[in-house]
Amino acid sequence: SNCGRDVLRLRNALDGGDFAAARAIGHSLGGVGGSYGFEEITRLGRAIEERSLRGDSAGVRGLTSQLEEYLSRVQPEFR
């Protein structure tokens, strides 16, 4: 659910041209994904961070859509 909120936060950051916020969200996703066994979240987060640093709005939007699609498919298991 936190990652779902991050999708919304990313879109809002991009709408406002706030690449620093998008970079920070990407950085956070890049760190937290692997901690919970979601390597795809880590990969997407790092790519979002990198493209945010370059000011690549279209790239970040595409990755955000990929993240949203991934989150709609993943089923976490709680042990």
Image (tube, rainbow, N blue to C red):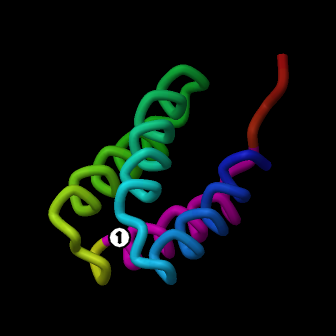
Q: 21 or 51, which is in the foreground?
A: 21
Residue 55 lies, in percent from the top left, at 22, 70
Q: Give the residue at the far left of this rendering.
A: 54
Residue 73 lies, in percent from the top left, at 67, 61
Q: 45 above or below 72? A: above
Kind of residue indicated by mark 1? Val
Residue 79 lies, in percent from the top left, at 84, 16
Question: What's the residue at 42%, 67% (across, down)?
Answer: 18
Whether residue 15 sits left or right of residue 79 in the image: it is: left
- Residue at numbered disc 1: 60
Question: What's the residue at 34%, 57% (across, down)?
Answer: 48
Q: 28 above or below 69? A: above
Q: Which residues are magenta?
A: 60-75
Q: Residue 32 in magenta?
A: no
Q: Count the marks.
A: 1
Q: 70 or 47, which is in the foreground?
A: 47
Q: Give the residue at the far top of this rendering.
A: 79
Question: What's the residue at 31%, 50% (across, down)?
Answer: 49
